[in-house]
Image (spheres, rainbow, N blue to C red):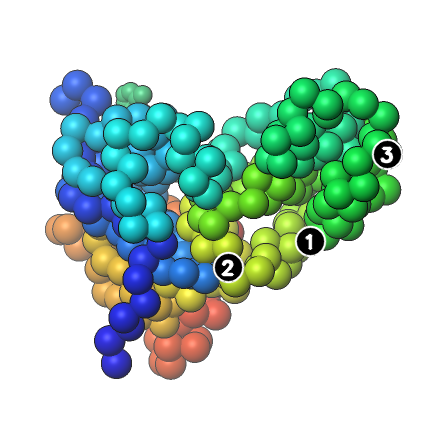
Amino acid sequence: MTDTTEPVLSAEGLVMRFGGITATNKVTLNLKKGARHALIGPNGAGKTTLINLLTGVLQPTEGRITLLGEDISRLAPHKRVKRGMVRTFQINQLFDSLTPLQTLAFTVSQQHGLGAGWWKPLGSNAMVVERCAQLLEQFHLTEVMNQPTRVLAYGKRRLLEIAIALACEPRVLLLDEPVAGVPAGEREELLQTVAALPADVSILLIEHDMDLVFSFANRMTVLVNGTVLTEGDPEQIANDPQVKAVYLGHGEEGHDAGPPQGMPAPSGGSAANEVASVGATKHG
Ligand SMILES: Nc1ncnc2c1ncn2[C@@H]1O[C@H](COP(=O)(O)OP(=O)(O)OP(=O)(O)O)[C@@H](O)[C@H]1O
Ligand SMILES: [Mg+2]
């Protein structure tokens, strides 16, 4: 059956060249409403570059980007945020001296046009207080809300980063490796919190951890050397011979070119088995 849902975010024929390197090669990608869409691919495939193009950090050499039906190709990054597209970064970026509560109060206040008054006693605006409490609760940050961000465990910092992104009330959330560097014991919490976001937030997730990818995504795009190798639902991707070849490091010639990255050798058998086996290996 054809899916007729309009994409919330659409990239058409995006090209990005850095000198002689084509980091993004005619990439077309549609993020559907409510999607849990994973963007996967080896290191250097061009995943972050694509996010930088979508968010306006980089201007594409060619191509067009549409957000909620409007061409945003030439729009400045902050205007794209205003229109509902919010990202997190591969490297954590936070105000270290502020507490999670202060950081969120600042963001929520900005979001509601109360920017000039964010420093007032935190109890002075009931709406801000309520929204902050909600976000702190949702992201398991309540118990550390008054600690300076710099002393927080890395996993909590990443949760705070996603909470900040959500405080901007996104329609589209772009997550660039949210669990990169997070201790194994903290990944699960983060994974579940992200998975539980409301369906009116459409999400594009970049992730090397295949456990997270396969438990999260209902759609996947595989990027290799700046080019979309394939797109499909998780089962299609897990069974795609081209995808297996890339993740097994066989390359085009079919010889063994090194350690598997992310995806292990499929054990053969059913698609479910293959998804399970794909989910069994983590990126280091
Ligand atoms: N500002 C830049 N100037 C020059 N080359 C760049 C720049 N940014 C990225 N590249 C190159 O573009 C290619 C894609 O890089 P990108 O960071 O998008 O990959 P990635 O898929 O996010 O990789 P990773 O999984 O390691 O994060 C790489 O060859 C990289 O060296
Ligand atoms: Mg990257």
Look at the numbered disc 1 and give the secondary structure of its residue. helix
Residue 55 in view in this figure: yes
Which residue has dot 1 on it?
189
* Residue visible at 50% across and 55% down in the picture: 201
Coordinates of residue 271 in the picture (x, y in percent): 37, 77
Of circles 3 and 2, the one toward us is 3
Which residue has dot 2 on it?
200
When asked about the image quadrant of residue 3, the answer is: bottom left
The residue carrying pointer 2 sits among few (fewer than 14), some (14 to 19) or many (20 or more) residues within 10 Å by Cα, namely few
Label 2 near ligand 2 (CB < 8 Å): no
Q: Of 54 and 175, which appears nearest the observer?
A: 54
* Residue visible at 35% across and 50% down in the picture: 68
**Marks 3 and 2, Cα distance to the nearest angstrom?**
29 Å
Q: Of 59 and 158, which appears nearest the observer?
A: 59
Which badge, 3 or 1, comes first in the chain's sequence? 3
Which residue has dot 3 on it?
123
Look at the numbered disc 2 and give the secondary structure of its residue. loop
Label 1 near ligand 2 (CB < 8 Å): no
Vertical comparison of 132 with 6: above or below: above
Residue 136 in view in this figure: no
Amino acid type at circle 3 is Gly
Amino acid type at circle 1 is Glu
Amino acid type at circle 2 is Asp
